[in-house]
Amino acid sequence: MKDKVRYVILSLCMLLAGCQQDDFLKDEVSLSGDGNLNFSISVPKEMMVTRATFGEKSNSARGGITNVDCERTYDLRYQLAVYRVDGEEDLVQVITPQKKVVDSYQPVTYSLRLTPNRTYKVVVWADFVKQGEDGDLHYDTRDFENITCLDPEDKQLNDESRDAYFITKEFTVKDDGISEDLVLKRPFAKVRIVTTDWNLYDLEMPDNFRITYYNCKRFTNINAVTGVSESEDLPESETTVYTGSINKEEKEYALNYDLSENNRTLTVDYLMTDPNEQTPIHLTFEALDGTTQIAKHDLKTNVPIKRNWLTTILGNILTVDAKFDISITENFENEWIIGEEWWNGQDINPVEPPYDEATQTYTVSTRDQFAWFSATDVEKSESEGRTVQNAESLAGKTIVLANDIDMSGIDWQPIFTQGETTYTVDGQGHVLRNFSMNGKFGTVYVYSALGGLIKLEYNAYTGVWGKFEGTMKDLTFENITINGRADDEVHTDIDGNPVDHSNESAYFAGCIGYTGANYSTTVNISNVHAKRVQIKASATTTQNVGGLIGWIGIGGDNTWLDGCSVEDAYLISGYQVGGLIGQVVSGRYVGIKNCQADKITIRMTSSYSKNKSGFIGQINTGSGLEISNCPIPTNVEYLNDKTGEPIDYTPNNDYYGICKENEDQIKWE
């Protein structure tokens, strides 16, 4: 299943509408097809296609349907019960839970006899059981009004078969029939911990973990009939410890964060939680190799969980002074990211990197040195009356990376220059990883109209480079997170102070936000790659969102990308949205050669705007644009941003959502 858990009741229809009197019918299970109410329960076709065991399609951002081995180890068990509604609150169970066990996700059908002109509540619970069995495995379901967990603390972590799904729905049986779709969803939140420094420093890696939840709610049971969960308050002292293990030699998951060599999902847990509210939890995480402790972190902040959401704790978990990004990312009801700076703010001390005057080259070895380019030149800023970064002194110079740069835990300020400052970035095959931006430091973009009478300033150009002109080569961006959603909720930091999201923006969002403004521009980007990019934007017309580049202007003779790629981008909302590039204005020359995008997910507010695709979101004009030797994007998902469900959307072209003018002038090679 792709980023959702859905079980669709395909039909709920009256077959014996001719019965006129309630007394003639008894609420009961009947022979298949003989009842006056037939439930056909199945999974969507796409779920059957994408179902996988741990292997090439396994994904810790998904749940049991994707990751559980139903070919050899588990079956999926459905249970359906019916309650008659007598009065406003009284429920009488008229059909006891009826079990159906399947091993290949084929539809199952329940045929029932229910009295017309009465109101009922149908409850469906689905979970995993041992193959060939139908008894409870992880959850005690003898009483649908009090379903509890059967697993002890040392059996709860890292078991995807603990996933489960349910729905409760009230309806009135009418003489003229009824047809209704129902969607099963998790009664749980899923919490996963992902490290970004697996084998990064040739240190000994862990094989077992301990998690302690404390000073928060711990939900103990769920009433599947009402959907309400009960909880107990855990003490501030660390008490109950939950344990889990992994095989150090082989990753359990292949996709999502685990695609990257130094990323690895360490633990997953399924937690019962409140049906409506966001619930804060606190936890301590320990990583051990045998009995030797490798790392321990106390996440004192409010880590948010909510029913049918995935909470991800991401960072350098296995090394000293580990830094985390906490994000909620699952294709269900909602998406937002909590940047680490809001709960564990860290300082950085920009230091000018070594400079060779003869070659005009800066050699960068540390993150403090890299941060120097985005740091403010106070003296110039004061004299010019505007913000001036050190990067504005880079004209004609070169930045060479001597090491991978890790910005985990820093509220990154994008690098930008005013005007057309052109310089070179030579990555030498190194990686820029773990950059988190919440929009606060976006480059100031001034919108001017009516001869300057109207001027509006926006924090725009959001990316590792907010604005770039010049040559960039042999570089990989990895784990780039941008939260630009202006209407997100207000959360609290570690001291209980509110964190205001109201001024966040992601206007030109990507690893490079904005480039190629006009014909005099030099933009040569070669062998530059982006892996695991997540951007959350707003659906306004200024939001240009791309996995690698947010916006490319009209270009010139020297504006091109060659041999670049994006793999695993999660692009939430925005207006012009593309897996590789959000928007290309074109008009003079923009060349895109030997580039590709794969494993792209785009969440949309509407299927009517055709300016989104897995490659380029919108092209303003086809004149001057060349696309050559670029494979068609594969594994592209378009989802409803509000629900996470698949949306009926097809871009106008395999390579772009829409071309507004001169589509026939695009040069293809």
Image (tube, rainbow, N blue to C red):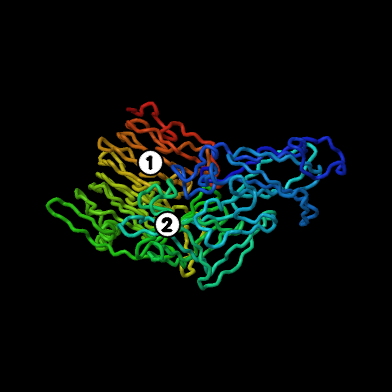
Q: Circles 1 and 2: CB distance less than 8 Å?
A: no
Vertical placement of residue 148 versus 172, above or below:
below
Q: Amino acid at mark 1?
A: Ile
Residue in the image at 34% along x and 30% along y: 623
* Foreground pick, 48 / 579: 48
Q: Which quadrant of the structure image shows residue 26?
A: top right
Sequence order check: which comes first, mark 1 or mark 2?
Answer: 2
Measuring from the top left, give residue 229's x and y in whole percent.
Answer: 64, 60
Report, in whole angstroms, how far the alpha carbon at label 1 lies from the one at label 2. Answer: 26 Å
Residue 165 or residue 487, whichever sits in front: 165
Question: Is residue 539 shown left or right of residue 440?
Answer: right
Q: Position of residue 389 (x, y in %)?
A: 28, 57
Residue 454: percent from left, percent from top = 41, 50
Disc 2 on helix, strand or loop?
Answer: strand
The residue identified by callout 1 is 581
| 561 over 376 or under it: above or below | above
Q: Which mark is residue 314?
A: 2
1 vs 2, front mark = 2
Image quadrant containing the C terminus: top left
